[in-house]
């Protein structure tokens, strides 16, 4: 049994990366519990495993005293001096109490410890592997689904996709191949738990990186994304090269690049808009396809504005069920109040004109 144990420890260290010393330490702790459980002993004991020979020894650890009152925990100084003259009252002494049949118990315990350590090591390896995929796109295969999750096989681990992260326009059937975005990786007690999504804005970003080389290499940058998964999304892009049109590059020749992503997402509509430092212009871009006459910022709230649009474009600017305005607000980070020219009246225009006049006066000075 000793040689087999040592061989198993060496193999585990080589194949699984589990340190031999760590296994021995865990084995010694487990053998202490096994000894107390099998022999009804409650005294303090210690187990030592010889890492070279594979021998196992159990010792009762007792306190050296002048007069022994509890033989289970105490040892007389007189008897201790017969072992070594170096002992003093108050020292601990180890007395070997290894049972004759303890080898069988040790072998069973060792097997349990090894199996536990292997499981822990495998869980750790899987966790380390998939934690690197957090915020990344990965392809998996649908296994099954229930009321809470769709379960997706990623190879060495089964990922879960909560209902809130499932596309409302998609049906997930067993053996379907699906691209998912890894939102979180947890090292749970039962093993690594990987959470994935089809609705996260990050999924859209990774899809564009796959489809548009200029986005992947950073020439064109995705600044922000607003998405109502399965229905419509707005993506704000800017170019880090003045000679490259960020919107045209992202959309691709005849819309081929963006159409590939639309197809991947089951027909989710895409608005690609140009990001700019000019906040008013960016807000106007975000309300595409509507025209914008003016953008007036709220002097009391720097993250709020009123957008004036032509009367005949009011419903287009707001969008079906307010979707266009809602996505534009998410994309820009502004609270946007949309008014038609006739609704705006003279009050808002007066404020806008007064600000413009003040700017003109300042420039003349």
Image (spheres, rainbow, N blue to C red):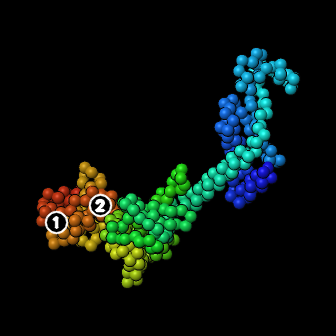
- What is the tally of numbered marks visible in this picture? 2
Can I make out residue 317 in this image? no
Residue 344: quadrant of the picture: bottom left
Residue at the front extreme of this rendering: 101
From the viewer's perspective, tell me whether residue 92 is left or right of residue 357. right
From the viewer's perspective, tell me whether residue 8 is left or right of residue 132. right
| Element type where label 1 sits in the image | strand
Would you call the spot at circle 2 few (<14 residues within 10 Å), some (14-19), or many (20 or more)? Answer: many
| Element type where label 2 sits in the image | helix
- Residue located at (65% from left, 53% from top): 115
- Residue that numbered label 2 is attached to: 329
What is the spatial separation of the Cα atoms under label 1 and label 2, in whole angstroms?
A: 17 Å
Residue 264, position as x, y percentages in the image: 40, 75
Residue at the top extreme of this rendering: 67
Would you call the spot at circle 1 few (<14 residues within 10 Å), some (14-19), or many (20 or more)? Answer: some
Sequence-first tag of 1 and 2: 2
- Residue located at (46% from left, 73% from top): 175
| Disc 1 to disc 2: CB gap under 8 Å | no
Residue at the bottom extreme of this rendering: 254
Residue 235, position as x, y percentages in the image: 37, 68
- Residue located at (41% from left, 78% from top): 260
Disc assigned to residue 340: 1
Q: In this view, does 269 lie above or below 195?
A: below
């Amino acid at each position: 049994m000793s040689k087999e144990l040592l061989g198993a420890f060496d193999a585990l260290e080589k194949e699984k990366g589990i340190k031999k010393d760590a296994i021995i330490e865990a084995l010694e702790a487990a053998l202490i519990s096994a000894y107390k459980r099998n022999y009804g002993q409650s005294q303090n004991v210690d187990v030592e495993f010889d890492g070279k020979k594979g021998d196992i020894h159990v010792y009762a650890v007792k306190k050296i005293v002048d007069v022994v009152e509890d033989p289970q925990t105490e040892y007389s100084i007189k008897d201790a001096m017969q072992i070594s003259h170096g002992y003093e009252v108050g020292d601990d002494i180890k007395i070997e109490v290894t049972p004759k049949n303890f080898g069988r118990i040790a072998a069973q315990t060792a097997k349990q410890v090894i199996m536990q350590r292997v499981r822990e090591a495998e869980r750790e390896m899987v966790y380390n592997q998939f934690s690197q995929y957090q915020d990344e796109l990965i392809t998996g295969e649908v296994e099954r689904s229930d009321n809470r999750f769709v379960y997706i096989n990623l190879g060495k681990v089964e990922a879960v996709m909560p209902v809130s992260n499932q596309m409302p326009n998609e049906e997930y059937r067993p053996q379907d191949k699906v691209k998912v975005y890894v939102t979180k990786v947890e090292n749970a007690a039962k093993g690594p738990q990987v959470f994935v999504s089809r609705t996260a804005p990050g999924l859209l970003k990774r899809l564009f990186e796959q489809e548009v080389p200029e986005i992947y290499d950073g020439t064109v940058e995705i600044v922000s994304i607003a998405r109502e998964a399965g229905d419509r999304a707005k993506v704000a892009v800017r170019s880090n090269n003045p000679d490259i049109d960020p919107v045209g590059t992202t959309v691709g020749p005849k819309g081929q690049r963006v159409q590939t992503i639309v197809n991947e997402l089951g027909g989710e509509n895409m608005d690609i808009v140009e990001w700019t430092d000019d906040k008013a212009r960016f807000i106007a871009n975000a309300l595409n396809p509507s025209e914008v006459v003016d953008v007036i910022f709220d002097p009391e709230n720097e993250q709020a504005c009123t957008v004036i649009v032509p009367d005949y474009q009011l419903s287009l600017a707001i969008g079906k069920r307010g979707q266009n305005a809602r996505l534009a607000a998410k994309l820009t980070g502004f609270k946007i109040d949309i008014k038609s020219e006739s609704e705006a009246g003279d009050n808002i225009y007066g404020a806008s004109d007064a600000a413009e006049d003040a700017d003109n006066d300042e420039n003349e000075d």
